[in-house]
Amino acid sequence: MVLPITRRQFNAAALSTAFLPLISCKKKSVGANALKIGVLLPTSGHQAALGQECKKGMEVAGPVMQELLGVECDFLFGDTESNVNAGRTKAEKLIQEGAHVIVGCYDSGVSSAVAQVCEQRKIPLVLIVSVVPQLTEQGYKYIFRNFPTGPMLIKNGLMLMKDLFEYSKIAPKKAAFIYVKETYGETMKAGVDKILPSFNMPFEIVSTIGYDPKTTDLSTEVAKIKESGADFIIPATRLNDGMLLIKEVMKQKLNIMGIANLGGGGMYEKEFFNQMGDLSNHWISNTAWYNPKAKIVDPVSRVFAQKYPDSFLETSSMATFEAIHIACDAFKRAGSTNPQELRDALAQTNIEDHLSLGGPIQFDEKGQGKNVRSASMQNSGGRPRVIFPVEAREADPVFPIPSYTKA
Amino acid sequence: MTTFLSVGLNGVLIGLIYGLMALGLSVVFGVVRVVNFAHGEMMVLAVYGATILNALFRVDPILVAPLIALFMFFLGYGLQRGLINRLLHQAEHVQFIILAAVALILMNLQLMIFGPDAKAATVSYSLETFELGTIILDKVRVYAALISLVVAMALFAFFKRTLLGKTIRACADNLLGAQVVGLDYKHLYAISFGIGSACVGVAGALMSLVFNVTPHLAPELTLLSFVIVIIGGLGSMGGALVAGVFIGIVQAYAGYFTTPSLKSLFSFLLLILVLMFRPQGFFKKAF
C-alpha cells in the first residue's frame, strides 16, 4: 500500500508542526516581569454596573503598574455573573489557567466562596471591596484586604458624621436607616444595630426599613420614613435604589437635613450624576475613597482620563486598581510568581504612595489592612468631592442641604 | 392616616400600570393560547425605546407612547407570523422553550446594546406632585395611570365593538368555526399578538417615567404579569386590569404594614390562595 503523501509534503508538514508551539505561545508569551492576575468581577447579573466600574480600575492598572513598578500585568478575566456558584467556578478556572494571584470579587458573598477556593489551592487573593468582616476573621492565610470592613465603614462613617455636625454646628435629632436586603445591606444593618448605640450620636434611629434589592418602587418605604418624622436619612443602597430613594424623597417633600450613608455606593457613581443631573448635588457618601492629594493620583488620573474621558475615578475603580497595585508590589518584592512567596510578600506589604485614603498599606496578621480610612464626599458640580478629612478636602461641606427642591 | 391613604392611592396608580402590562399578556394568551415568556423582555425593550427617545430629543414618553406601541405591534406581529405560528401545533413544552429562548436572546441583546445600568426617562414634571390636602400624589404616576386606564378602555371597546375585534374573539372562542367561515386565523393571531405587544409598548413607555429599569428586571416583570393574569383569570382582559390594581394595593399596604422587602411575598401568597380556592381567577375569560 502506498501512502498518499510525498516526502516533500511530509517535510513541509513536519516543519509546520515544529513551529506550532511558537505560534500558540506567542499570544500568551509574557516577560519575566509579568504577573498573571486573575480578576474576578460581576460584569453581568444584578451587580453588573458595579462590576463594569471596577473593570475600569483593572484597565487603568495595567499601564500604570508598567510605568511605576515595571511590572507587566497579564490579566485573566472572569465574570462572576453576580452569582456565588459562578464565582467559585470561575476562580477554579483562572487558577487552572495559571493565575499567580486572584483579585476580586466586589460582592462579599462571592468573595467568601472564592476565598475558600484560593485557600484550598494556596493562591493569594487580594479582595476588592467585599466588606464582610468574616473574610479576614476565619484564619485564612492567603486572603488580604485593604478596604474597610462593614463595621469599620460604619465606625468611620459615624466619626465623619460627627465631624460634619461639629463643622456645621447643627445636628439632626431623628434618623431613618434604609437598607437593601442583600449581604451588603444586612452587614450594614447588623453594624448599625451593634455599633451606633455606643457612639453617642446626636440622633436616634426612629425607623429602620429593609427593601428588596430588585425593587423598582420605594414610595411606600419613603412614606414610612416621612411618617416617622426623621430629619436625616442614612441609606445603605446600591446605585439604582439610591436614585429611586432620592427621587421619592423629593416627590414626597420630606423635610430633611440631608442624606448621608455609612459606606457603600449608590450616590457617587458616574451614572448617578448622569441620570440625576442637578438633583445629584449635596448628598453625602462616607466610604473608602482615593486620596486626591496622593502622588499616585496623577498617573492614575491621566491614564483614566485617556481611557474613560466621560467618567471619573471612584470607589469601585479605585479599590480594583489598588488590589492590583498590592499584588504587583508583592510580585516585585518577591521577584517570583511562586504563590507561597507571593503570599509572604503580601503579608510584608508596606506601600507608602498608594491611591486610597489612609496611612501606608500594611496588613495585620489576619490579612486586613491596618491603615484604611474612609472619606466623606459631598456631591457638587457633577462629581463627589472630599469634605472630610480636612487634609484631603476638595470642597467645603454644605449642611443642612439648602432645600432639596432647589438642589 | 394621611400616609395610609397616600400609600393606598399610590398602590392604585401603580396597579393600573401593572394592569396594562398584564393586559398584553392576557390578550396573547386569551386568543393565541401561547404563554409569552418574553413578555418582560419586550416590556424592557419598550422602556429603553422611550428612554432613548427621551434622552435624544427631550420628548415626553407619553407623547412617544403611540410610536413605541406601533413598533411593538409590528414586532409582535412579526414574532407571531414568523415564529409562533409555526409552533401552534407543537407540544406546549416546545412553545415554552422557544419563547424562553426568545426572552434570553432579547435580554442579552439589551444588555449588549444598552448596558446593565438602570434607565429612566426624565420630564419637566418628574418630581412634581398633586397635593390633595395632606395627601401627595406623584404627577407622573397619575398621568401614567390615567393613560393606562384609557388604553385599557380603548382595547375593551376594540374587542367588543369593532368587526376585527369580534373576528379575533371568534377565533379565540371557536377556532374550528372561525376556520369554517373562512377567517384567516394565522393573520388574526398575529394581529392579536401585535395588539398585546402594543399594550406592552404603551405600558413600557409609561413605566419609563415611573421606574428605573434594567434588562435584568425583565424576568421579574414577566413573573409579575403572570401572577396578575392568573389572579385576574387567564384570558380575561377586565380581570387583568382589576387584578393589577389589586396587586398594586396589596403590595403597597404589605410594605406599609410589614417590611417592604416582603411586598412580593404577599403577591405570591395571594396567587397561592387564588389557585387553591378559585383556580379560575377573579373573572371568567372574556374571549
Image (cartoon, grey):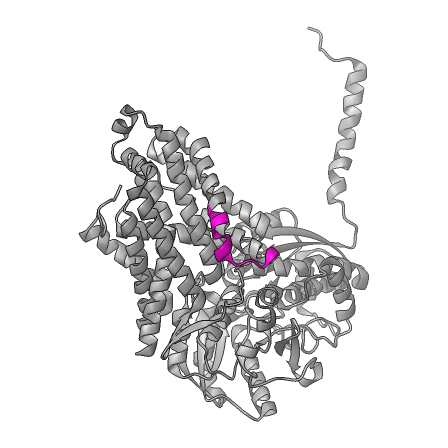
Q: Position of residue A20 (x, y in %)?
A: 75, 32
Quarter location, residue B35: top left
Q: Is residue B214 visible?
A: no
Which residue occupies the foreground of this view, A262 or B90? Answer: B90
Number of marks present in the image shown: 0
Farthest residue to the left: give it: B277
Q: Position of residue A180 (x, y in %)?
A: 45, 68
- Relative to B192, say whether A200 is above or below: below
Q: Position of residue B114 (x, y in %)?
A: 58, 52
* Residue located at (25% from left, 32% from top): B174
Farthest residue to the bottom: give it: A169
Q: Is residue B272 magenta?
A: no
* Residue located at (66% from left, 74% from top): A381
Which residue occupies the foreground of this view, A126 or A138? Answer: A126
Q: Position of residue A47 (x, y in %)?
A: 53, 59
Q: Which residues are magenta?
A: B56-69
* Residue located at (59% from left, 88% from top): A163
Farthest residue to the top: give it: A1
The secondary structure that most of the magenta stretch takes on is helix
- Relative to B151, say whether B78 is above or below: above
Q: Is residue A204 visible?
A: yes
* Residue located at (30% from left, 48% from top): B237
Q: Is residue B66 magenta?
A: yes
Quarter location, residue A67: bottom right
Judged left or right of residue A194, residue B1 is: left
The C terminus of chain A lies in which quarter of the figure?
Answer: bottom right
- Relative to B84, say whether A309 is above or below: below
The N terminus of chain A lies in which quarter of the figure?
Answer: top right
